[in-house]
Amino acid sequence: MTTGLIALLDDIAALTKAAAASLDDAATQAAKAGSKAAGIVIDDAAVTPRYVVGFTADRELPVIGKIAMGSLRNKFFWLLPAALLLSSFAPWLLTPLLMLGGAYLCLEGYHKVHDLLQPHGHGHGEDAETPAPSGETEAAKVASAIRTDFILSAEIMTIALASVSHSSIWLQAAVLAVVGLCVTLLVYGAVALIVKADDFGAHLALSSAEPLRTIGRAMVHGMPPFLRTLSLVGMLAMLWVGGGILVHGLHELGIHGPEETIKHLAASLGPMLEWPMGAAISAVIGLAAGVVCNPIAMGITALLSARSRAGADAA
């Protein structure tokens, strides 16, 4: 009896260790996958605060909460099952889809560069991402933000899936779940802090203590340049990530030259500059890809718009 109990405890201990190892593996893989989606995460955090413009201070956090819940639904109810089905039944589609998403990132990065150089250019980027007028209902703004989040979340989940595409289905599901949850908490937690930082700074500016007033004024005046810097970092990260995805996708499809050339050039500068140089070259490639994709995207948009108008006229 005692021997059997000890054996049972040993089995439980072994299972516990195996489960802990699996969880640790999932956490490690999730961290690696999440780091590859850094550009999209930063851009998401930079874009989302605009969706609370026009609301009173007491509605800002509830609106962010609604968007965050919509983001979780996007990831867990739609994107995670779709990613697992893709991995199980059509894994060959993963690289083309990832490259398509990379091209989208390059296009968005190009639009941001264009708007930076010509603020009143083609209507994309900052102006296009600004929500509708303040008279729009809260529900409509939340719905618009969730639709934007769906695109960014799809890219994040696809990148995460590509990082663990050769793992078991259960590890894939665990990694995608961890990435989805952590990214959502990170992005919308950061957004909440960004949105309320100026209110907190204004509160400190009214303090009777001079050091607190100084900190408060610095926070109020510092938020606009901080948001501009965040947007700039997001732009560069999108180009770097998008270009890197395209180059690696070509490598996966058998075209090894671009990735090997980048690695050789970056490595020739030494270990200190290897990563920055590789990222810079990928960003330049991403910008070039965005320039190429822009007229294609404009043509597709015009075609869809023409078909939509034709359908409306026929009705």
Image (cartoon, rainbow, N blue to C red):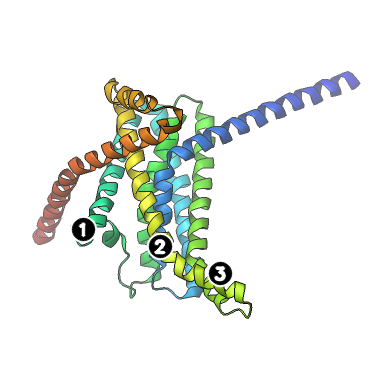
Residue topped by disc 2: 225
Residue topped by disc 3: 215
Whole-number angstrom distance, CA of label 1 to CA of label 3: 35 Å
Task: Tell me the kind of residue under disc 2.
Answer: Pro
Task: Tell me the kind of residue under disc 3.
Answer: Ile
Foreground residue, 18 or 122?
A: 122
Q: Residue at x 30, y 72 (%)?
A: 133
Instruction: Pinpoint residue 17: horizontal percent, then vertical percent.
Output: 70, 27
User: Where's the C terminus, which quadrant?
Assistant: bottom left
Which is nearer the N-term, disc 1 or disc 3?
1
Q: Nearer the viewer, mark 1 or mark 3?
A: 3
User: Where's the N terminus, which quadrant?
Assistant: top right
Whole-number angstrom distance, CA of label 3 to CA of label 2: 16 Å
Above-or-below relation of 211 to 173: below
Q: Residue at x 48, y 40 (%)?
A: 34
Tag 3's secondary structure? helix
For residue 5, side relative to residue 110 (left or right): right
Q: Residue at x 49, y 44 (%)?
A: 180
Number of residue marks = 3
Whole-number angstrom distance, CA of label 2 to CA of label 1: 19 Å
Foreground residue, 240 or 246?
A: 240
Foreground residue, 286 or 19?
A: 286
Residue topped by disc 1: 118
Other residues around mark 3 within 10 Å, as few (<14) / some (14–19) / many (≥20)? some
Q: Are marks 2 and 1 in contact (CB under 8 Å)?
A: no
Which is nearer the N-term, disc 3 or disc 2?
3
Above-or-below relation of 128 to 7: below
Instruction: Pinpoint residue 210: horizontal percent, then vertical percent.
Output: 61, 76
- Residue 272 visible: yes
Foreground residue, 239 or 313?
A: 239
Tag 1's secondary structure? loop
